[in-house]
Amino acid sequence: MPGINLSQSSQQDGSAGRNTAERGSEFSGRLAASAGLLVLAFAIWVGLTLYQNKLQSDTDSIATDITNKKTLFNGNDVDKVADLQLRLDMIKQNFADKQQRTPDKMLTQIESVVLNGVVLTKYAYSGKSIAISATADSIKTFAQQLVTFKGVPNFGAVNIGASTKNKDGTVDFDLTIALLK
């Protein structure tokens, strides 16, 4: 083929030598980076292995402590703890019951169900019952008030004590209301 020059010039030979040198330094840089990453990965693996061994030894020492404390806790001690816990539960329950039923709360509940035309003249709270003295403006109001008290959910038996009809048509009455638990 005429016009094709297959020989390389001396200028191209010099650039080819530089490319080989650059490639060598580039290869050695990549080799150093790879070796650095390999050393870093090995250091991380060693660190994780040491940390895992430390966690395992901590877990083993805690398990040993639990086992030792369980052996120190004999049947008599367990009974004492269970008895104490039972007493604490009973105290909490009694305290909660007392908090739910206070004289103020019971009076507020009675006030909410007292009808118009009924005036309370006496109120006594004993914890298990309530004693009330009141005056109703008529016998009809007195009867309606009894029915209202009997309809209150946490009131038990409503017992009528003395009741007196006055000359002006009013009715004085005494009630004792048992409280449900």
Image (cartoon, rainbow, N blue to C red):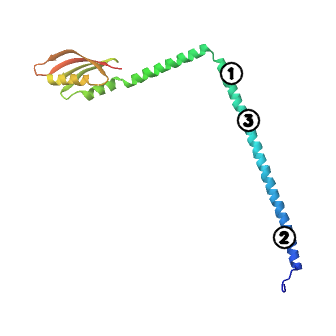
Question: In the rendered structure, which amino acid carries the disc numbered 2?
Answer: Asn
SS class, disc 1? helix
Among the two numbered marks 2 and 1 on one chain, the one whose residue lies closer to the N terminus: 2
Bin the neighbour count of mark 1 within 10 Å (Cα to Cα): few under 14, some 14-19, many 20 and up: few
Between circles 2 and 1, the one closer to the viewer is 2
Question: In the rendered structure, which amino acid carries the disc numbered 3?
Answer: Lys
32 lies left or right of 129? right
Marks 3 & 2, CB-CB < 8 Å contact: no
Among the two numbered marks 1 and 3 on one chain, the one whose residue lies closer to the N terminus: 3
Say which of 143 and 18 sits in front: 18
Q: Which residue is drawn at the image coordinates 23% and 25% (left, top)?
A: 148
147 lies left or right of 104? left
- What is the number of the mark on residue 54? 3
155 lies left or right of 33? left
| Residue at which label 2 appears | 19
SS class, disc 2? helix
| Residue 137 visible, this orientation | no
Q: How much space separates mark 1 and mark 3, taking CA atoms? A: 21 Å
Look at the image and tell me in which quarter the N terminus lies: bottom right
Question: In the rendered structure, which amino acid carries the disc numbered 1?
Answer: Asn
Say which of 127 and 22 sits in front: 22
Say which of 16 and 79 sits in front: 16
x%, y% of residue 43?
Answer: 78, 46
x%, y% of residue 165?
Answer: 13, 18
- What is the number of the mark on residue 51? none
SS class, disc 3? helix
Q: Which residue is drawn at the image coordinates 73% and 39% (left, top)?
A: 51
Q: How much space separates mark 3 and mark 2, taking CA atoms? A: 52 Å
Marks 1 & 3, CB-CB < 8 Å contact: no
The number of numbered discs placed on residues in the rendered structure image is 3
- What is the number of the mark on residue 68? 1
